[in-house]
Amino acid sequence: PPNTKQRRRPPSSSSVLKLSEVKREVYELGASGFSKRAKRVFDDEKLAAFGGKVKNPKMPFKMLLGIRRAEKERAKRAQDEARAAGIVTVTAPKLDSTLRARGKKRRPKRGGGPLDDSAKDGILRIHTTTKR
């Protein structure tokens, strides 16, 4: 026989499917130990994966502010620890110092010269620059 070596077969789709099933089962088993809030997030992710609509939980505004503040503190602490460990991370671009000092965001220009048509109170005013 000219070809005595056996060729490797690619893994069958059934073995790949079994591996993904095992991974899902392990993940769901770990999810059984979640806290109440984390379990709700996990269930919402499963629902979204099936194409369902995730309902946004209602809560008092002060509680929401506290949760957001805690998330920011956690993110800042993680960023400080990463910086101390020498890990380089990507940061968002900063605004100009003049805009930042006034607390304003950069806005796109909207025109507004002598040749610009403007509408006010439902009346379109056309500016002409030529003399008759």
Image (spheres, rainbow, N blue to C red):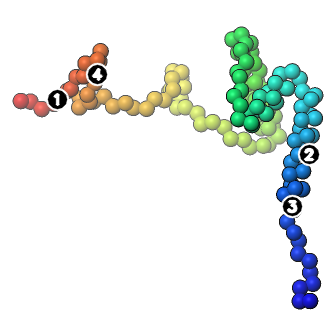
- Left or right of 97, for residue 44: right
- Give the quarter of the image for residue 35: top right
Kind of residue at disc 3 = Ser
Q: Nearer the viewer, mark 3 or mark 1?
A: 3
Q: CA distance from mark 1 to mark 4?
A: 15 Å
The residue beneath circle 3 is: 12
The residue beneath circle 2 is: 22
Q: Position of residue 13 (x, y in %)?
A: 84, 57
The residue beneath circle 1 is: 128
**Image mark for residue 119:** 4
Q: Residue at (87%, 41%) from the top-left corner?
A: 24
Kind of residue at disc 4 = Ala
Looking at the rendered structure, the secondary structure element under dot 3 is loop
Q: Earlier in the sequence, mark 2 or mark 3?
A: 3
Dot 1, crowdedness within 10 Å: few (<14), some or many (≥20)? Answer: few
Residue projecting furthest to the front: 14
Query: Where does the N terminus fall, quadrant-wise?
Result: bottom right
